[in-house]
Image: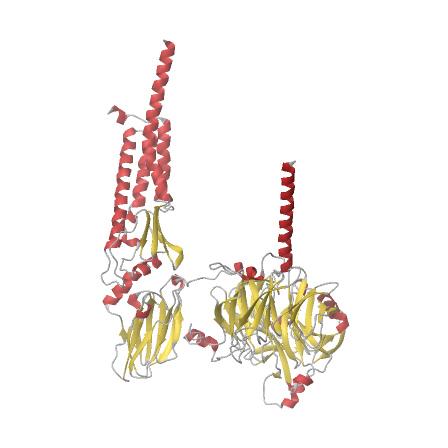
Amino acid sequence: MKRGSKLGFAVVLVATLGALAAGCVASQGGGAAGSAAQKVYVKPGEKDAYYAFLSGGHHGNIYVYGMPSCRHITTIPVFTPEPAVGYGNDEESKAMLGGFTWGDAHHPGLSETDGDYDGRWLFINDMPNARIARIDLKDFKTKQIFGPIPNISAAHACPFPTPNTEYVFAASRFSVPVPNRDVKVEDYAKDFRGIVAGVKVDPKTGTMSLGFEIMMPPFDWDLSDAGKGPSLGWQFFTCYNSEMAYDSLEIKASQNEMDYFAAVDWRAAQKAVDEGKATMINGAPVLDPAKVKGIAYLIPVPKSPHGVDVDPSGQYVCCSGKLQAEVSVYSFAKIKAAIDAAKFEGEKMGVPTLKFEDCLEAKVPVGLGPLHTQFDNKGNGYTSLFLDSQIAKWKVGPPWNVEDKIDVYYSIGHLMASEGDTRHPTGDYVVALDKLSKDRYLNVGPTHPEAAQLIDLRGPKMELLYDFPTYLEPHYAQMIKAEKLHPITVYPLAENDKPGVIKRAEDARVERKGNRVDVYGLVVRTHFTPDVIKVNEGDEVYFHWTNLEQDDDIAHGFGILWSSKNMQIEPGETKTIHWTADKTGIRPFYCSNFCSALHQEMQGYLEVRPRGTPQAAVQRPDAKTIAEINALLAAR
Amino acid sequence: MSYLSGKFRPTERGLILFAAVVLLPVFFLPVFPIWHMHLRAPQYPEGLNLHIYTNTIRGDVDKINTLNHYVGMHAITATDFKEFSYMPQLLTLFGVLALLAGLTGRRWLALVGWLAFTGFAAYMFRDYVLWLYRYGHDLNPRAAIKLQVFTPPVIGFSKMANFKVWSYPGLGTWLLGIAWALGPIALLAERYGRRRAAAGAAVTGAAKA
């Protein structure tokens, strides 16, 4: 009897505790257990689950964040010189920048295989100069800057890779005459043209080359996305200003009830170019849809659309009319049927236009100022609402209803769901990328940072986890599972065959030909070899430094006093920097990247003698120095 | 004398042949490390490793050399060790001796082989200690950091500057140790077997009586 009552008490106690625990979890609203703080906390020494690549906007680079901790890990210089690592200062990256010191980077595009991120490359556009950069995710370095792409004026709808990274694209946001020439702005409709360019990507090396261009009506081509699954082979581009205004666009370009999105059959376009149907303009093969049929079509979209986003299945194309409160969802099957039946309502400068009703599948009343849509793994779309400062979650498919909304701070532009533009979104997080931060962070004066919020998608309701500032100015961003990337930590010295590389102290030397001086040197903890270099005023000096280190994180710097010459040399890397010996006198140089216990001692002197001072054709370090360095390097 | 010129029974021959199996492949396939050194410092939470094989040194040799130059230690290079040019050959030669002894069963051959192997092992261990002593004592007087001379640990743990160092035998040494131990085991097995046979005979005799 006694025993029975004790047991009964225990059962009641356990049941009560269980109910309490369940209540705790339920009160947080999210699906995964734990408070918001616990969900973003990544313990010291532990790593994030996702890499997030945020475009740097008019900073011209890419910010790399870890998610869910929202920690800024690094910045990849892309279109803008970066003095710490010497990007744009060493000869190779200087040549790659091609004289530009500014870019406006909007849309990162991770390379894909079968419509999912494969972790090989990251593409990003420079809108104003119509360039596309490729970053190798093996070392997070910019490897190619392609462009300026001829005839393209402001590559905003760019690069948006195809599902197997066959192509990246660019389209003109601000139409100009093609070819650009002496015309009157008033002759806009007659002389100006938009351009859509397909840029081929080499499947092995990632090297970009121009595939085709298509002459389009002079609308403002805005955003893009690649078809996948049933819509594979098609690329979609939204436009506004079908009114073809060249001034007061704010008013004049907002008059038409409908603008368009274009569907481009890139395989047909490439085939037409390969068959010689293009006209060469400024070195680019340009197709005229009035002459070459079957490469592009226009589908009406209400109210100056911005984002175009293809759902994970590839069946639906979601366009956001920024001046209405709806996302217009189009069925690709319907678009295809209309094209196949040649059911056109007219044409715009040779591009056939389809009927709105023939293509539309649904209108989703998401809220005010819809801009972009991302997706999860449970059949939901998430649309950013600029005017409402919200994200709307809605059902992709009948009944096409809005299921949830969450406030963001403030005026959201793009949003980034975890792998949320692929065939298989992971459905873990979405990040709001806001245009205004206003009062959210410590006041740093009138130049406010941008703002971002991490939101949990795992529960039935969206849950705000974290709010963090970013520097100017992320537009689009992408989030990839960390396990898909396997970056190297040092450059294998054995594979270094860069021009100017040396690997032994005996080969360290200063060579002179006329007034060109080449310094072939080594950097290793903790000295430059050679560290005394004799040149004459007026010499053009090229320093080729090889970092012999093979240890993680032992980068050395090379900075020359009273100059803008500085660069970082990573373990196993060879870099060349050019400096003009501008003034007679002694010019110290030093390791500008803290490397080790005797970093302060890592320095050298340039002895700059007056013009015409006799100098040896080849200077080498003395035998003792060579022996000392070699003792250190003997194992290599 | 007649004991030495005698032959082992199949059991002992089997044990000796097993030792031959361990030793013979060393020259052709020196795949197992014989000694390890594991170093850790605050900046190297993942640790640095030296793996010594019968014919070379592998692991983070370059990284360790770069660090060692601060204290003036000689660079560790495989070419400095003449041992690497004969150690695998000799171990395989001991394997050949064990094979012959196992096949013929000749006690003297097994004993000579085992004694030579024992002497060689002792010599190599002493040689290894000497190398460690030299690395820690023959320091460049011009080095940036002046250290008290030292001997890195032969086996076990020690602390050197900001590094913690563990030193321990590798799988190769364990296998060699087993091969070596099979010598005494064979002798013990034989003695035990003989005693049992004698006891068996005594029991049979008693029963007959």
Q: A224 or A326: nearer the eye?
A: A326
Inspect this view and state whether residue B52 appears.
no
Nearest the eye: A50 or A438: A438
Position of residue A630 in the picture relative to residue A492 (left or right)? left
**Quarter of the view holding residue B26:** top left
**Residue A539, position as x, y percentages in the image:** 32, 81
| Quadrant of image for the N terminus of chain A | top right
Q: Residue at x 62, y 56 (%)?
A: A24
Query: Residue A239: where, in percent of width, then height?
Result: 66, 77
Q: Residue furthest front?
A: A2
The relative height of residue A47 versus residue A74 in the rendered view (above or below) is above
Direction from residue A613 to residue A149 in the image, left or right: right
Q: How many marks?
A: 0
Please tell me whether residue A61 is drawn above or below residue A12 in the rendered image: below
Q: How is the image coloured?
A: secondary structure
Give the x, y percent position of residue A65. Answer: 52, 66
